[in-house]
Amino acid sequence: MVYYQNGTSEMNQTDGFLSSILNDEDLQLMDMAMNEGMYTMRMLDSNNAISNLSISGAAGATAVSRNDMERMDTSSDSAVSSMGSERVPSLSDGEWCDGGSDSGHTTGEHYVTDYQSKIRPYDYSYSSRQLNNGIGNSDSARMPPVAQKKHQMYGKRYFQDQSASNAAHLPQTPLKYEYRDSTSYPIPNQPESVVGSRVPEMKYSCSVEFGLQNHLSRNSIDHIQHNHTYHLPAESSGAMQRPVSRDKSKPRKSEEEHLTRDEKRARALNVPISVDDIINLPMDEFNERLSKYDLSEAQLSLIRDIRRRGKNKVAAQNCRKRKLDQILSLADEVKEMRDRKQRLINDHEFSVNECKRMKDKYQQLYRHVFQNLRDPDGNQYSPYQYSLQTSADGSFLMVPRSNSTLSNPEAKEPPQNHKE
DNA sequence: TCTGGATGTCATAGC
DNA sequence: GCGCTATGACATCCA
């Protein structure tokens, strides 16, 4: 066992050399690197946490990202149920219209007005959205507080007297997406109070408030300016008559042309209940209304079809909205994963470089120490016969090579350039 | 005329 | 069994 000769003049030089190595900023950089790496890992863990949170909250489909948060802000006053089974809080019937399920035709003006400020017929809350609300809570105030049936959720009541001036424009412009509630059909021998007695005409915009507009780089109005009013010929239509072209350049001839197909059918069969009521009344009330009239089989069949189609129409709209949202959420997740992958690559690259640098430092130190060691006779030790081992406290031990590997399997081999 | 997006409708499954 | 919702598939309209 030979110890470092601290008393020699050479060691003074060595001290300087060692201190230069040991105090090298690279070592500090190493610490920094490690800290940074750990920080990065914490960040990754954090991301994982968020990701897991979002996944668990949205049936594995929704990532919580800033974009999602922003989208959430635009769509959290839900009107439609989530993918799950939870029910969306409700507003009173006075606050929600139950229309919107029919081809809402409204003028462009009306649409713009409604779209921007009134109607959010496609809003719905996923569980993840609710989760997000819990985090951001920016929109919770707009969330209806009580569970609500879905057929009561689509569209808010919009009284025409809110925009009398707009109403004045109605005759001049083709109707688009304007749904006139309380379509009343004059039924002989029916009391006025029962049929078509609603005074305030209400409009429903079948708008699509996609919170995705920003993502899709699309004018929010572009995709809803179709006039999906079904114009039927004289009537007596079959069960499935094709929608007729709705050229808005053609002058409007009569109100009837802008009735939906089902409205025209209902009118043709003298159905005494408005299409809106047929679609949106709760089952009990709906049956109660039906019981008031002596309806033929054809009328009952049509009413059932109207109700089914009306509900399914809304369901389809929500389904599509939901699908788009899922696509955007997945796109966010993909982006997040790509970013994470890049961060990991960078961290790994940095670690490899640091490892290599430290190896070089160690070899340098090893060589320096070994060359300055002397036996009792003042001769250098042969690197082929001895090797140095470093202990945990930083001290060096000279160990015979043949024994070193036997006695201590972890003994470090001399560097390759040790033979110099 | 073609094309893609939007929307309505039907069929079906599941609750 | 009924009513409702969700969703794929198809049809139609429209820019």
Image: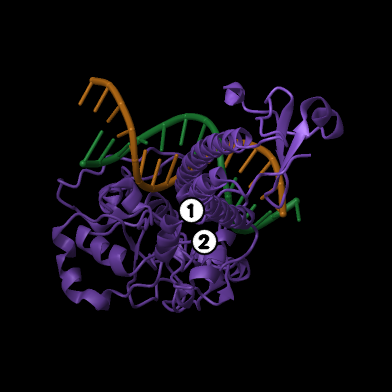
Chain colours: A purple, B orange, C green
Residue name at image x 50 percent, y 76 percent: A91
Does A124 sit above or below residue A365? below
Pick whichever of labels 2 and 1 is earlier in the sequence.
2
Residue A9 at x, y percent in the picture? 54, 46
- Figure quadrant of the C terminus of chain A: top right
In the rendered structure, the answer to whether residue A205 lies left or right of residue A69 reads: left
Cα–Cα span, label 2 and label 1: 7 Å
- Please name whichever residue, A269 or A31, is drawn nearer the observer in this view of the structure: A31
Does A6 sit above or below residue A240? below
Identify the residue position indicated by label 2 in the image.
Answer: A80
Residues at marks 2 and 1 touching, judged by CB atoms closer than 8 Å: yes
- Figure quadrant of the N terminus of chain A: top right
Q: Callout 1: 10 Å neighbours few (<14), some, many (20+)? A: many
* Residue A318 visible in the displayed image: yes
User: What element does badge 2 sit on?
Assistant: loop
Label 1 chain ID: A
Q: Callout 2: 10 Å neighbours few (<14), some, many (20+)? A: many
Residue name at image x 61 percent, y 68 percent: A291
- The residue type indicated by label 2 comes to Val
Identify the residue position indicated by label 1 in the image.
Answer: A318
Label 2 chain ID: A
- The residue type indicated by label 1 comes to Asn
